[in-house]
Each structure stands twice: as C-alpha cells, then as structure tokens.
Image (cartoon, helix red, strand yellow):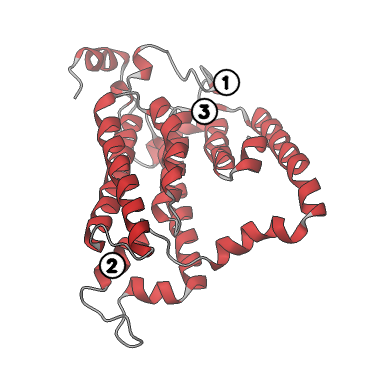
Amino acid sequence: LGVGGAAKLWPLFILGPLFVLALRAKRLPQFWAATVTAVVAWIAVNLPVAVLYRDSWFRFFDLNKERPIDWGTSWYIGRFLDSKWNTGAVGDQGPFQWLSDHVPVLNNVSYALTVLACLGIAALALLAPRRPRVAQLAFLVVAAFLIFSKVWSQQYVLWLLPLIVLARPRWGAIVAWSVAEIGYFTAFYAELLGAGGKPVIPEGTFVLASSLRLITVAVLCGLVIREIWRPELDAVRRTYPDDPDGGVIDGAPDASWVESLRRRMRVAPRPAPDDERLAEKAPVA
C-alpha cells in the first residue's frame, strides 16, 4: 500500500476499511503492523524526491488546493445545471457556480462530504450482519472519494476496475458501467477538441455522459451496499466461507461487542445459516 500510495494516493484509502475490519475482527495489532509498513514504504519512496526536488514534490499538493471544478465531476454537472437558471455573475449565481468561484470553500465541502461518506461506510461495516469483505469496503471508499471530488479524470476508471471486480463479480452492472465509462471517454475527447476551437458535441452531451458515469458508479455502490447488508446475496460468499482477500481477517470471529452494538442500534439479527442456503438457491439478477 505504501509503494502504491507513493505512485497515486488512492491505495492508502484502503487503510480505512482495513482498520474498521480489523477492529471488528480483533486484528488491530496486524493492522498497525501493516500501517507502519505502508508509511515506511511511502516515506522511503518519497523522501529522496522531496529533499532533492522540494518545489516539484509539493506541487502536487498545491495543485490539489488550487484546482477549480474539473470536467466531468458532480460539481461540474451541478454548475452546468446552475447555468440554466443563473447567469453566473456576482449576485446571480447558483450554489455550484458560487463554489466554483470560491475554491477553498469547495475544497472543504468536498472533504467534508467524503469524510461523512466514509463514516457512513464505517457504520455499515460495523453494523452489517456479517463482516464485509475488504474489496467491498475498499470499492465504496474509493467510489465515494471520486463522487465528491472536484477532480475525476477519465483514467480514474483504473482505480475502480479491480475493486469492483473483487467487490461484486457480476457481469450485468459492470458492463453497464463500462459502457458509461466508454461513453464518457469519447465525450471527454470530443469536449477537448471543442476547447481547442473545433466544436464536436454540444456541452449538454458531455454533461449527459458525465451524469451517466456518475449514476452508474452510484448504482454499483448501492448494489455493493445491498450485498453487505444482505450477505446471502454475495456471489463470493457462495464459493468462499468468508473473505479470500482478507488475509488475517479471513475467517476471524467478530469481537464480542459487535453483536451488542447491533442490538443496541436495533439492527436486524444475523441471518441464520438456513436462510443463507435458501438465498443461494434463489435466482440472481
């Protein structure tokens, strides 16, 4: 994770799901060992560059703070919709237009929404009838980051692709999402040509492609959440008893406080084994 995080930040996001799962499975010592190893690896890769090329190394962080709303994001879609009712001039701005002109506030709102989403994912992980799989939570966290981020480049599909295949290996929804991503990829470069002075598609077409990408990712999140809350629907658990990607978490019993927490929160009881076997025989869409 540390080396991956040195190349691109998103692998470090997986530490969050690992912490929640380790907490539920009483595997915190192993989690802290993995975290320390990741931090050491990240520092080992980054420190020489940060020392020798300090300004260039910090440029990544500066750019993240300075960048305005980028193409294809939920904020971009909102700003486009604002333009249908507001001119964008001072005093006649919709909320997304206003945020576009106030980047520090936009940053804080984006971070806050991402943190709230992650807290919701953590609550889901602790209250679910069975401990979720690592890939399920990792996909939800990375997807939440992209949904609320002010930057969602077309190559970020590579972040989600391995995670969704592991989180929910079913063809239907993945194919629909892939079609939406291909549509966005095509629309993006058409929009890029338009920005260079050669209009190819109207702005509304690009926004539509962006919206379809956003919607399909949100649908995938909903499907993963459903299978976390109803683990008998999880295709992976039909073949494996727990989590084949879980490492030391795989097969570990829950901490004793988990069931007490679920009762205190008045969550439905854990499904009985017979219920799970019946669900396995049911047809899956």
How packed mark 2 is, by other alpha carbons closer than 10 Å (few <14, some 14-19, many 20 or more), is some
Amino acid carrying label 3: it is: Ser
Residue 80 marker: 2
Helix, strand or loop status at disc 1:
helix
Q: Nearer the viewer, residue 224 or 172?
A: 172
Farthest residue in the bottom direction? 91
| Residue 61 locus on image (x, y percent) | 63, 59
The residue that label 1 is drawn on is: 247
Mark before the other along the chain sequence, 3 or 2: 2
Q: Residue at x 45, y 37 (%)?
A: 158
For residue 271, above or below residue 144: above
Residue ID at (75%, 38%): 40
Q: Residues within 10 Å of mark 3 (few under 14, many from 20)?
A: few
Q: How many marks?
A: 3
Give the class, few, some or many, for how many residues have Cα within 10 Å of label 1's Cα (few <14, many ≥20): few
**On the image, which quarter does residue 201 sit in?**
bottom left
Describe the element under mark 2 as helix, strand or loop.
Answer: helix
State the image coordinates of residue 122 (x, y, percent, origin top left). 46, 42
* Label pair 3/2, CB-CB below 8 angstroms: no
In the image, farthest residue toward the front: 198
